[in-house]
Amino acid sequence: MRAEGRRDGRHEGGRRRGANPYRRLPWIGAGVLAVVVGITFLAADGAPPSRMTGAGMVPAPLPPPPPGNPAPAAAPPRLSGEVAMEEARLAALREARLGLEREIETLRAELEAVQRALPSQKTMPTEPAGPAPAQLTRLAPAAPPAPVAPAAVPAPPPPADAGLRIVLHHRSSSSQGAAAAEEVAGRLREAGLEVQSTRQAPFVPSTPVVRYFHEEDQAAAARIAGRLGRGWAIQDFRAYQPQPSPQTIEVWIPGG
C-alpha cells in the first residue's frame, strides 16, 4: 500500500512538473514574436530606400542627367532661301545707293563748274555783218534785174573746228529732249560740223550749255554756242576728272 502510495505521489508530482512547460509556451511565443517584430523594424530602418517597397515606401526618382551643350539646330531650307533672297535684295540696294552717290558727285562737280563759270561767262560771239554793197554810178538806163541766185551753201567750218568731237546729251526717256537733240544735230550739220554721237543722261542742266574740257577748246565752244543761237552758254569743265581727249565738246540740252 505504501509502495503504491509513493508511486501515485511520484506520478502526480511528475504530472505537475510536466505541466509547467506548457504553461510557459504563450510567453515564449510572445517573446519570439516581439523579437521578430523588432528585427523587422531594425531592418526597415537600416535598409536603403530602394529596398523599402515592402514597407509601403516609394523609391525616390533618380535625378535627371545634367543638361549638355545642345548641338546647334540646322536652319530649315526655306529659312536659308529667304535669308539668301534678303541678302541679294540688300546687295542690290547698296549698288543702287552707290550709283546715286556717284550721280550726286557728278552733279555737284557740274554745279561747282557752273558757279565758277558764271562770273567769267563770255558773251556769245555774233556773226560779223557782211560789207555793205558798193553803190554803183548810174551811167546807163537800169539794167533788167539779174536772175535770183541759188541759196548760198554754208561756208565750211574753220580749220580749228574741223577735228572737233561733238557729243549731244539730252534727258533719258524724254521724247521732247530727243526731238530737241535731233534739231540741234541738224543745225550743227548745216554749219558744217560733224556730230559724233547722241547720248541720254538721267540728269541734265536747266539751261542749254556747251561744255569744253581744255583751254584750247574754249574758242571752239564759243563758236558752237554762237551758231546755236541766243540762250546758249559755255561751261568751263577744265577741272572735271577724268578729262576726255582734247577737242571734245559736249552739247547739253535741257529736259522738256
Image (cartoon, rainbow, N blue to C red):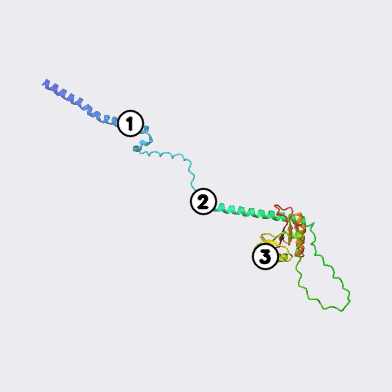
In this rendering, is residue 89 above or below 226? above
- In the rendered image, which residue does mark 1 sit on? 39
| Residue drawn at point x = 31 percent, y = 30 percent | 35
Of the image marks 3 and 2, the number of the one nearer the N terminus: 2
Residue type pointed to by label 1? Ile
Residue 62, image x, y percentages: 41, 39
Distance of label 3 from label 1 (alpha carbons): 116 Å
* Location of residue 150 (image quadrant): bottom right
Distance of label 1 from label 2 (alpha carbons): 70 Å
Residue type pointed to by label 2? Ser
- In the rendered image, which residue does mark 3 sit on? 178
In the picture, measured across the screen, residue 58 lies left or right of residue 159, that is left
Of the image marks 1 and 2, the number of the one nearer the N terminus: 1
Which label number is shown at residue 80?
Answer: 2
Mark 3 or 1: the one toward you: 3
In the picture, measured across the screen, residue 21 lies left or right of residue 226, that is left
Within 10 Å of disc 1 (Cα), the crowding (few <14, some 14-19, many 20+) is few
Residue 108, image x, y percentages: 71, 54
